[in-house]
Image (cartoon, rainbow, N blue to C red):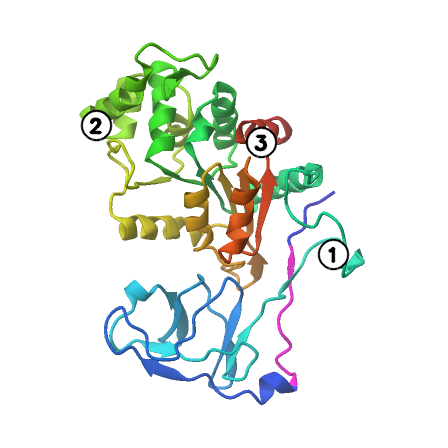
Amino acid sequence: MTFQLGKYIEPDFTQEVFVKAPEAKLAEAPRDMTAPENFHATSIFPEYFKVDGRWLLPADSRMDCVAVYEDGQIHVREFRNVKKGDMIFLGRTERCEEGIYVHDDSFRFPGEDDEEKNSFAFRQTRSRETAFSYDYGSLYELLEYERDHGYITWILGPACAFDAGARDAFSMLVAKGYVHALLAGNALATHDLEAGYLGTALGQNIKTQKPHFNGHYNHIDTINKVNLYGSIPAFIEGENITDGVMYSCVKHKVPFVLNGSIRDDGPLPEVYEHTYIGQDAIRKYIRKSTTVIGMATVLHTIAAGNMTPSYRVMKDGTVRPIYFYSIDTSEFAVNKLGDRGSLAAKGIVTNVQDFVCNLAKNLR
């Protein structure tokens, strides 16, 4: 079966509610990093603003931001990027009352129209009792499509580096073109490089899971050695590292963003230590992404999820959905994205090592 993207259903702007809607109001930002009173905060959904009789859709969006009108276009910006005098849209309503329409039912996915929807049904949440075989099948088709037509961004936690098979499987995904960008923290890169350098992750052998004597030194020895070389690529070359996640990204020129936290050892040279500089680096790749997959990292996945809208406006002007998956052994982790506003995210409750190995076996 040929993969089909969800179809975007544009609002019918000939309807009376749109025709009679007032123009959206604008007001100047009173100072840097400050929006005017009654500012409109954006969501993950496509949002239209009525300007000079036309309904305009921002080409790029993010929830919990403000919409700025500049040079005939709408730019969605974080509060920290607001400048005094920016013209910002006002309004707290979402159904044209103030010239703003939030299009929260915008996509139709294959098979949806054929399904009967009941008000009562069992097992509608994503839990360990959910059968995920259909999700896997859909994901294989999605990734094969996105490899050639989209932009796939992965968010990895350190558990993705603890197993030799999982490292090899993810490396295959990189080599075969299923990874266009990688987002992670200091720990993922550290333990992956530790595995390539010393054969351990957090001091445990990645093949046998047996702890090494004084193995608790291994990850900080690795950080120390990488810092001696001055960069991850220089370390990989200098120490003849030939496997792993970071090795594969460097070899195949896949960009990666590593963000630090208050708990980090080291950190590695490429790790962003300033929160907002790191956030901007993440958003640079989220802005390109059409599919995002977070594995075994609640905080990094939520961070990326909060920057990811439900839609992407392509270069030809078409609007398509963004697919977002969260993979974790914890139901709490995969459901938390929905609690934080990323309602388009789909969770799969499973071991990340099993998940990535399944992908590697079933993708072309």
Label 1 sits on what residue type? Glu
Location of residue 23 in the rendering, given as x and y in whole percent from the top left corner = 48, 86
Pick the front one: 132 or 322: 132
- Image quarter (top left, top right, bottom left or bottom right) of the N terminus: top right
Asked whether 293 falls inside the magenta stretch, the response is: no
Pick the front one: 2 or 8: 8
> Within the image, what quadrant is residue 234 found in?
top left
C-alpha gap between disc 2 and disc 3: 32 Å
Can see residue 241?
no
Q: Residues within 10 Å of mark 3 (few under 14, many from 20)?
A: some
* Mark earlier in primary sequence (2, 3): 2
Q: Residues within 10 Å of mark 1 (few under 14, many from 20)?
A: few
The numbered mark at residue 355 is 3
Label 2 sits on what residue type? Asn
Q: Going by the image, does 204 lie left or right of 15?
A: left
> Within the image, what quadrant is residue 11 found in?
bottom right
Q: From which residue to which does the magenta span run?
A: 6-15
The residue sitting at 59% across, 48% down in the picture is 346
Pick the front one: 314 or 191: 191
Disc 2 target residue:
227
- Image quarter (top left, top right, bottom left or bottom right) of the C terminus: top right
- Position of residue 326 relative to residue 165, above or below, is below
Q: Going by the image, does 156 lie left or right of 321?
A: left
Label 3 sits on what residue type? Phe
Asked whether 10 falls inside the magenta stretch, the response is: yes
Location of residue 276 in the rendering, given as x and y in whole percent from the top left corner = 29, 53
Disc 1 target residue:
112
How many marks overall?
A: 3
Main SS category, magenta section: loop
* Mark earlier in primary sequence (2, 1): 1
Residue at the left extreme, as displayed: 228
Tell me the element at label 1: helix
